[in-house]
Amino acid sequence: MRGGGALHGGGASPKSRGMTLRPILLWPDPRLRSRAEPVGRVTRDVAALADDMLETMYEAPGIGLAAPQVGVAKRLLVMDCVKEEGAAPRPMVLVDPEVVDRSPATAVCEEGCLSIPEHFAEVERPAEVTVRWTALDGRPHEERFAGLWAICVQHEIDHLNGVVFLDYLTPLKRQMITRKMQKLKRERARA
Ligand code: NI
């Protein structure tokens, strides 16, 4: 996810050896529409993918990235919604995440997406969610997310189900942005 306006700076990126930037797929792309497969066991390859995704996300810069956005149809996402200038980054890796509880209260947030650059729209979602996932250490984790974290984790889990934030907009608005993205992709292909 790319936050509307207040973006996470690239300066806090925790770099380590062996990380690789991965190209981010641009909408529309059939790979952004398919349901990703469970990861299951956390192998060294899964950890390497998560490292690459974190570096790619910080570099973009974004606050969340799901594996299907880098062409990997696995249920894995990374995020870091720490926005305060000078605050320590909190890179999170969620393997096989699942929303187990949603608050009845909703929040409206301006969302953007690294796969749909330069387009932002207000989306209404549950304000808080409890998510269960497997961490890189292979252990189960559970956390209640609120604020931007809650929005971001829902946006990224949507990607694992082939859903993008445009799906919450009117068909007209969705078509308009999709046409602009098709044009952008044609221009980039020619460049
Ligand atoms: Ni996104």
Image (spheres, rainbow, N blue to C red):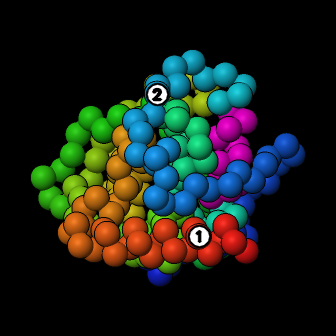
* Circle number at residue 37: 2
Residue under the point 15% across and 58% down = 105
Q: Horizontal placement of 48 versus 153: left or right?
A: right
Give the residue type that dot 2 points to.
Glu
Magenta span of residues: 47-57
Residue 116 or residue 53, whichever sits in front:
116
Specify the quadrant that holds the C terminus: bottom right
Residue 72 position within the rendered picture, expressed as x and y whole percent measured from the top left: 58, 38
* Circle number at residue 186: 1
Q: Main secondary structure of the magenta part?
A: helix
Residue farthest toward the left in the current orientation of the protein: 104
Mark 2 residue element: loop
Position of 101 relative to 81 (above/below): above
Residue farthest toward the top in the current orientation of the protein: 41
Distance, label 2 to label 1, CA atoms, is: 30 Å
Residue 84 or residue 53, whichever sits in front:
53
Mark 1 residue element: helix
Residue 174 or residue 97, whichever sits in front:
174
> Mark 1, residues whose alpha carbon is within 10 Å: few (<14), some, or many (≥20)?
few
Write down the quadrant of residue 185 in the picture.
bottom right
Residue farthest toward the bottom in the current orientation of the protein: 5
- Can residue 65 be seen here? yes
Residue under the point 70% across and 43% down = 51
Residue 89 position within the rendered picture, expressed as x and y whole percent measured from the top left: 62, 59
Q: Earlier in the sequence, mark 2 or mark 1?
A: 2
Residue under the point 52% across and 35% down = 73
Give the residue type that dot 1 points to.
Arg
- Can residue 143 be seen here? no
